[in-house]
Image: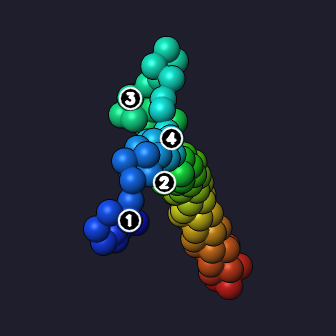
Amino acid sequence: MNRFAVGPMTTPEYNEWWVRRINDNTHKSNQENSQSIEEYLLVIPSELEIIRQDFERRNANLEKKIEQMEEVKMNLRLDIDVQKLETEKLRKGKNKAEEELEI
């Protein structure tokens, strides 16, 4: 706030009151239990830090699930390969038996 005074309109008492009024509006910290802003910010994580930690936790969980699903997928492919081999073996046996019956 700017003050504009012309000549002797302000008295020394007024000036003294004005300075005290401005100084009374400033925040005075308690030095006994005070932390520096850096320490305070280190102790209390920001909202962004909390969101980042939550994202990393969820991401780690999803990565574990993906690994498990890939393992299951690989096992299912192996089962399919085994089933195909058994089916082919049975088909060959069936064809051989049919040929023997025809002869």
Q: Nearer the viewer, mark 2 or mark 4?
A: 4
Mark 1 touches mark 4? (CB < 8 Å): no
Q: Name the amino acid type tagged 2.
A: Leu
Q: Name the amino acid type tagged 1.
A: Met
Tell me which numbered mark, 3 or 2, is placed earlier along the sequence.
3
Q: Name the amino acid type tagged 4.
A: Asp
Q: Nearer the viewer, mark 4 or mark 3?
A: 4
Cα distance between the residues tagged 2 and 1: 53 Å
Tell me which numbered mark, 2 or 1, is placed earlier along the sequence.
1
Numbered tag placed on residue 86 in the rendering: none
Numbered tag placed on residue 48 in the rendering: 2
Q: Name the amino acid type tagged 3.
A: Ser
Q: Is residue 62 above or below residue 2?
A: above
**Residue 65 coordinates in the image, percent (x, y):** 58, 52
Q: Could you tell me if residue 53 is visible in this image?
A: no
Cα distance between the residues tagged 1 and 3: 43 Å
Mark 1 closeness class: few <14, some 14–19, many ≥20 residues within 10 Å: few
Mark 2 closeness class: few <14, some 14–19, many ≥20 residues within 10 Å: few
Mark 3 closeness class: few <14, some 14–19, many ≥20 residues within 10 Å: few
Q: Nearer the viewer, mark 1 or mark 4?
A: 1
Where's the N terminus, which quadrant? bottom left
**Which residue carries the number 3 mark?**
36
Residue depicted at 43% across the width and 46% down the height: 13
**Which residue carries the number 1 mark?**
9
Q: Nearer the viewer, mark 3 or mark 2?
A: 3
Numbered tag placed on residue 24 in the rendering: 4
Tell me which numbered mark, 1 or 4, is placed earlier along the sequence.
1
**Residue 50 coordinates in the image, percent (x, y):** 54, 47
Mark 4 touches mark 3? (CB < 8 Å): no
